[in-house]
Amino acid sequence: MPDHPHEYTLKRKQDPGRFVDAAARTIWECGYARHYLHRPRRTLIVGDYICWVWTRPEAPSHPFPTDTIFVNRAERHRGRVA
């Protein structure tokens, strides 16, 4: 995605407990809802980065940290909405 460079980490490639407790739960508890691709995504600003979780498609409309399948991270750009 050259117009939207970002990094991500997959739950299936990490220790699931640490992934949920250290990354996903922090974003869920400290973040805010932001719409992206027609769905709300839980998002957290961390310094110069914006981080957001991606849940399973079959997850309910208000999913839980355990439904998170990967976490994205991208640099915040001046002038772009976070």
Image (spheres, helix red, strand yellow):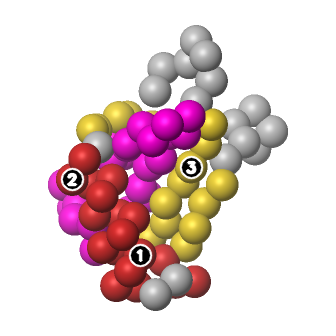
Residue 15 horizontal/vertical position (percent):
46, 87
Q: Residues within 10 Å of mark 2 (few under 14, many from 20)?
A: few
Foreground pick, 26 / 57: 26
In the rendered view, would you say 3 is above or below 12?
Answer: above
Q: Going from the N terminus, do you reach mark 1 or mark 3 first?
A: 1
Instruction: Tell me if residue 58 comes above or below residue 72 in the rendering.
Output: below
Residue 28 found in image quarter: bottom left
What is the crowding at mark 3: few (fewer than 14 residues within 10 Å), some, or many (at least 20)?
A: some
Magenta residues, start to end: 39-66
Residue on which disc 3 sits = 73
Residue 63 in which image quadrant: bottom left
Q: Earlier in the sequence, mark 1 or mark 2?
A: 1
Q: CA distance from mark 1 to mark 3?
A: 14 Å
Asked if the stretch drawn in magenta spans residue 58, the answer is yes
Amino acid identity at mark 3:
Arg
Q: Is residue 38 above or below residue 29?
A: above
* Furthest residue toward top: 79
- The residue shown at (60%, 60%) is 8
User: Image point 37% across, 34% down: which residue?
Assistant: 35
Left or right of residue 63: residue 47: right
Q: State yes or no: residue 5 in magenta.
A: no
Three-letter amino acid code at disc 2?
Answer: Glu
Q: Are marks 2 and 3 in contact (CB under 8 Å)?
A: no
67 sits to left or right of 46: left
Instruction: Name the residue carrying label 1.
Output: 19
The residue labelled by disc 2 is 29
